[in-house]
Amino acid sequence: MPEPLITDEMRAEIGKESPPWTCEVDKTAIRMFARSVGHTDPIYYDSAAAKAAGYRDIVAPPGYLGTPVFNPNAPGRDMMRGGAQPSRPLKRILNGGTEIEYFDDICAGDVLTAKSHLAAVEEREGSIGQMLISTNKTVYTNQAGKVVAIMTGTGIRY
Amino acid sequence: MAATWNDVKEGMSIPELKKNCSTQQLVLWAAGSGDFYQIHYDKDFATGTGLSNIIVHGALKNAFLGQLVHDWIGNSGRIKSYGCSYRGMDYPNEDIVCKGVVTKKYEKGGEKLADLEIWTENPKGQKTTPGTATVVFK
């Protein structure tokens, strides 16, 4: 059996909330996202079409939860690599899965505040060898203080 | 035509969505999503990490599945939750066929709901991105 990857320091991080960061939901970014996926529904491109369909403005397509505001002078934020480290360095990262729960519409003009925490860590032996699997939950709250989405992301390091 | 509540039947397949990513689409997605990890557009970098080629972003396949479900319900409803696991890699210039089946139709808390199994299929017919979705109808 290989040495366990998960350290006590990693376990101690479970549930600790990150500092908040801001994700802007704007028209140009939504259009870029929708275009890159290949969406054809005009609610993702055109305000009038979105309003006619009952939305406040251009709609955030599935999977788009705003664009984190980029600041070249702020320290980097990397949930997968940052924080407590496993017992030996792991070089490679794969995205294991994504789950999003929605509680309200997200539309152009919204400003979301995101906070995340490590929800679980486990290790498994797979075809690619010993893997460290981290589950992160990110809670997105809009400008009105309403939780609009929770994203659960699984990261695999090996 | 968007599906309506009356159209929904357990066991029914929803219309397929066929994708085939050019490397250009992966670069578009990098910009659209903010994921600039080089394994998705730099072949030398990708093979340097042990991959056989550039791979399609997992989150892009997740977004494809979101489009699959959205295109099915259109403005008849909303996606309440959806997600998937990234089990197998997909490559540029290969078909990625998004499919879904309704597994449950029910009412709960005054909402008209349907659960689906959703997935992407590679040219070998393997489900590389299996997942689930729940939609709420108006």
Image (cartoon, coloured by chain):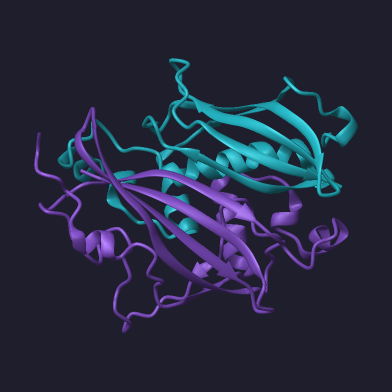
Chain colours: A purple, B cyan
Name the quarter where the C terminus of chain A is drawn. top left
| Residue B111 percent across, percent down from the top left | 83, 47
Tell me what residue is drawn at x 85 percent, y 56 percent. Answer: A53
| Image quadrant where residue A25 sits | bottom right
Residue A19 lies in quadrant: bottom left
* Quarter that holds the N terminus of chain A: top left
Picture residue at 45% right of the left edge, 19% below the top: B126
- Between A52 and A144, the residue placed more toward the observer is A144
Q: Eyeballing the image, is A34 above or below B96?
A: below
Of the pair A150 and B36, the residue shown nearer to us: A150
Does residue A6 appear to the left or right of A60 in the view shown? left
Establish if A89 lies above or below B5.
Answer: below
Tally the numbered discs: 0
As drawn, the residue found furthest toward the right would be: B6
Q: Is residue A84 above or below residue B11?
A: below
Q: Is residue B79 left or right of residue B132?
A: right
Residue nearest the observer in this picture, A153 or A75: A153
User: Picture coordinates of residue A46 (x, y %)?
Assistant: 75, 60
Q: Position of residue A125 (x, y in %)?
A: 22, 33
Indicate the position of residue A148 as horizontal and vertical percent values.
65, 64
B119 horizontally vs B102: left or right: left
Query: Which quadrant of the view contains residue A149?
Result: bottom right
Q: Most extreme residue toward the top, as rendered?
A: B124
| Residue at the image position 43 percent from the left and 42 percent from the top | B58
